[in-house]
Image (cartoon, rainbow, N blue to C red):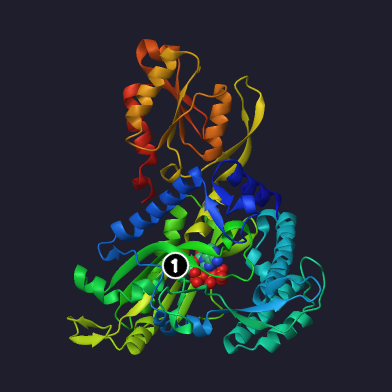
Amino acid sequence: MSDLFKNIVSHSKEYGFIFQSSEIYDGLGGVYDYGPYGVELKNNIKDYWWKAMVHNHENIVGIDAAILMHPDTWKASGHVDAFNDPLIDNKDSKKRYRADVLIEDYIAKIEAKAEKEIAKARKRFGDDFDEEQYRTTNPRVMRYLKQMEDISKRLAHNLKQNDLEDIKLLIEELEIADPVSGSRNWTEVRQFNLMFSTQLGNIAGEEGKLYLRPETAQGIFVNFLNVQKTTRQKLPFGIAQIGKAFRNEIIARQFIFRMREFEQMEMQFFVRPGTEMEWYNYWKEMRMKWHRAIGSSADSLRFHDHDNLAHYANAAVDIQFQFPFGFKELEGIHSRTDFDLGAHQELSGKKLQYFDPEINENYVPYVVETSIGLDRMFLAVLSNAYTEEMVPDAEGNEAERTVLKLHPAIAPVKCAILPLLRNKPELTEKARTIFDDVKFAFNCQYDEKDAIGRRYRRQDAIGTPYCITIDFDTLKDDTVTIRDRDTLAQERIPISRIREIVEQKVDFRQLF
Ligand code: ATP
């Protein structure tokens, strides 16, 4: 783990954002609990997504489907047969890995070498540097890029053809070693189904076998007609859902990036066949805008086309975010054709069609999906916001502070109400009166413990945009000091303006 990533993980725990699940029993791998500030931030991210997708689109509606579904759902969707990851064990360390991830990590190392060469050249040539030209003419960089492309193509081909033997061969040819022990003593590659199964109470054996949903999308597909009929939506229209999903990941790692229990925010957009690419491009752009609006820089986001299309897709792209451990998938946009509705129609024997009055035809709609992991988004937001910097302290000396520069609309606490001294009842009573007024407008916090400077630091560490200090002047003229998290500017304002100032800053409309 890089130092930055380690600091983010320990900050998350220290300030009550994220805890390891069942920590007192030494934890459960790949499962995490959200603490008091974590739950607020997570709810705000959900809210941002829901407002952007559902409330801002007349033709998108929401649902909340159950986690348990009829087991045939997962036969039709292809998850029983094909929701597998290629697994490989190291015979010496007894550690288990995803074979494709070992190869992807190898590719990432070559990419890092290429980027290092390019960075060196940029430094050498200064303003005259033409990166594109360098990429296409420098022999060493070209060799790295070609190597990356060859390996990616072979991996994608093998995954598509289910050629597990060649995946093993590739690992051997590249001399990939166990990252922990350095051993190259590998088992064969096997497929491993990622669904968690459980048992229905009243039916024994295979018959009663159920799965915890590995994605929320299928709850939307099976409800397609229920929703379309009850809301009288015309195509194109979408159904959105936020909910838990479960995957028995072979290795859950990188904190909340890859979990076994996680949350997804998915939207399935139903369109007339033949128009899907138009909508695919539309959603690609819309989703990228959504990410940028929350404060992620353009440099930290990129599109990545899939080398290996899933069985249901005719086009697919990931939005990747530059996490502290490199660019990784944050969201997927997939053109799923009529695969899912078609498969459910066939297995259930129930028609899942739409009558299109414009062309006077019945058909199974095509689907464009946007699918984002809420927890991954949480990690992206946290990585983007986490800042260590030097700022002047109360005496004017430089001091280090850790601050979460979260967009105010998603900050867990919007404003902190701080009486200057805790043992002066006239100050604490006044502060309480203010707190009791603003708490109905937004989430705020009353804090009277420790010196004011320490309280400011505590609020910085959880990303609170404003601190309000109540002092002796407040008792005379009903004014308070308002401190801005980012600029550290302090201003004297009347109590009557607190709500208006904070509300304006934390309003979700700032994001749209
Ligand atoms: P990956 O390649 O990283 O395993 P995926 O392509 O299988 O992801 P999708 O099935 O497209 O992922 O799921 C959509 C989104 O759900 C992903 O973009 C990601 O944000 C999130 N997601 C998927 N698996 C996990 C997981 N194990 N933990 C946290 N989030 C996840």
Residue drawn at (38%, 27%) of the image: 435
Q: Is residue 302 visible?
A: no
Residue drawn at (54%, 28%) of the image: 455
Q: Amino acid at mark 1?
A: Ser
Q: Is mark 1 within 8 Å of ligand 1?
A: yes
- Of the pair 131 and 343, the residue shown nearer to us: 343
- Of the pair 278 and 423, the residue shown nearer to us: 423
Query: In x, y percent, where is residue 42?
Result: 46, 51
Q: Residue furthest top?
A: 476
Residue drawn at (25%, 76%) of the image: 225
Mark 1 crowd level (few <14, some 14–19, many ≥20, 10 Å Cα) = many
* SS category of the residue bearing label 1: strand
Depicted 154 relative to depicted 13: above or below: below
Q: Is residue 320 left or right of residue 469?
A: right
- Disc tally is 1
Q: Is residue 39 left or right of residue 126?
A: left
Examine the image and state in which quarter residue 13 appears. top right
Q: Which residue is mark 1?
A: 371
Q: Is residue 225 left or right of residue 13?
A: left
Examine the image and state in which quarter residue 226 appears. bottom left
Query: In x, y percent, where is residue 145?
Result: 69, 74
On the rendered image, what quadrant is the N terminus found in?
Answer: bottom right
Depicted 439 relative to depicted 507: above or below: above
Residue drawn at (50%, 14%) of the image: 423
Q: Is residue 12 left or right of residue 501?
A: right
Depicted 413 relative to depicted 138: above or below: above
Query: In x, y percent, where is residue 139?
Result: 76, 73
Query: In x, y percent, where is residue 329?
Result: 55, 66
Q: Is residue 325 visible?
A: yes
